[in-house]
Image: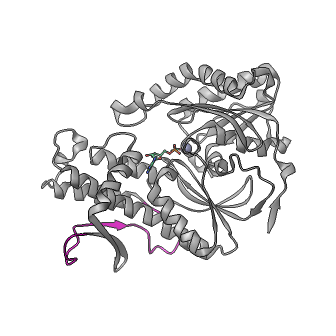
Amino acid sequence: MLQYPVKNLSNKTILAIETSCDETSAAIIQGTEVLSNVVYSQIDLHKEYGGVVPSIARTAHQEKLPEVVEKTLAEAGLELVDVEAVAVTQGPGLAIALEVGINYAKDIATKLDIPLIPINHMEGHLVSVLAGLGVKHIEFPILGLLVSGGHTEFVLVHGIGEYEKVGQTLDDACGEAFDKAAVMLGLGYPGGPAVSKAAAAGRHHLDFQMERDQQTTYVRAYETSTSKAQPKYELPIPMLNSGDLNMSYSGLKTAVKQLVNNLSGNSDNRNIRETGESEALTKEQVEEVSAVFEEAATEQITRKLKSALKKYPEVTEVWMGGGVVANRVLVAKISNLLGEQDVTLRIPKERLLTADNAGMIGIAAAFKLADSQKALDPTRFGEVDRDPGMSL
Ligand code: KG4
Ligand code: ZN
């Protein structure tokens, strides 16, 4: 087994900047210690549109970034001149939002004549689990499970910077599916937290069974209080029998839509709340459908993870990063699975580190900075990584 020696982690003071989507964030990092991590969320600005509006995100990043950087320096008890390197999210993300952070970081690096370190956002999510851990060595390979609003993927980590993507969603990301289900159920944006909250209530009345009919496995939900002759709800768990580590969420999303249609007694979309025309579902139905959806969505990842561990028995640690790590049902299922298999689960130690934040970008940069080849001269850096294929 490979070991990653500590000498490959820089202890220099790094200012990290993240503006890939709808959070404006700046952090100060030394090694894996996050001295400050300020996140300004733009949720309120995008809420009325039901999703992130890129031009609004860009303007908000431009307005807020200087203030966020100032605040993070103050919280760390530092001044700009104390910063020894600047790290910035290069992609994947919204190009016009990324550019705000990149230009700002580039200016600071040029002004102070210090290295500029471009970081892949997903690498940030991966190493977010290391925050505050005082890493001595890491034993590879590790299996990374990245679950966010834009990505759902398994990455075999052979070393920091040496990544092999071994499975991914073929369409929507898990967080995106939560967001879309939330819209259909009239739960608003951002959907993940709202669906998981509604689901927690819906779970009280339901028992779940995983049942396979030919090629498809279903989550069938039975009412706890009644006899179990007929399921009250049923949703498919796509790809379970695909024989690989890929996932899919679009079929589940369509099934939720049909279920909402059926419950509202309408075969077209007229009565789905996303049209804003109807409140056809009762609160209890919204909670129960949320619960069945959450069960299917989380079961898919957990079962694929089980297959991944079977395929890579040398893995003794799973690192889980991304916004969906805030989902307690998912983490509980994975934690149970890994407990049975004697595999260690690492998740970010605080909520702030699961969603988009600059702290995780700084940690990735600390590894890159130790390998000075990868820290760029700011004058040579300027390209935004627009290609989602470049992600981990
Ligand atoms: O990592 P992240 O902050 O941004 C991206 O890089 O995409 O992830 C945001 C995603 C959103 O889709 C959000 O709905 C989802 O994470 N999310 C959740 C929960 N909290 C956030 N999904 C399910 N359950 C949650 N509790
Ligand atoms: Zn993210």
Q: Is residue 392 above or below residue 223?
A: above
Give the image location of residue 48, x and y in percent. Answer: 33, 30
Q: Is residue 339 above or below residue 155?
A: below
Which residue: 59% across, 50% down?
Answer: 389
Which residue: 22% across, 55% down?
Answer: 285
In the image, taking residue 388 as reference, residue 227 lies left or right, namely: left
Which residue: 63% across, 73% down?
Answer: 342
In the image, taking residue 94 as reference, residue 34 lies left or right, namely: right
Quarter residue 259 falls in:
bottom left
Q: Is residue 245 visible?
A: no
Give the image location of residue 217, x and y in percent. Answer: 37, 74
In the image, taking residue 217 as reference, residue 318 lies left or right, namely: right
Give the image location of residue 168, x and y in percent. Answer: 53, 60
Q: Nearest the camera: 205 or 192?
A: 205
Q: How is the image coloured?
A: one colour
Residue extending furthest left?
265
Residue 243 lies within the magenta run:
yes
Quarter residue 241 falls in:
bottom left
Q: Which residues are magenta?
A: 223-248
Q: Is residue 317 visible?
A: yes
Residue 214 lies within the magenta run:
no
Give the image location of residue 213, x and y in percent. Answer: 32, 79
Residue extending furthest bottom?
214
**Prevailing secondary structure class for the magenta stretch in the rendered image:** loop
Q: Is residue 99 above or below residue 33?
A: above
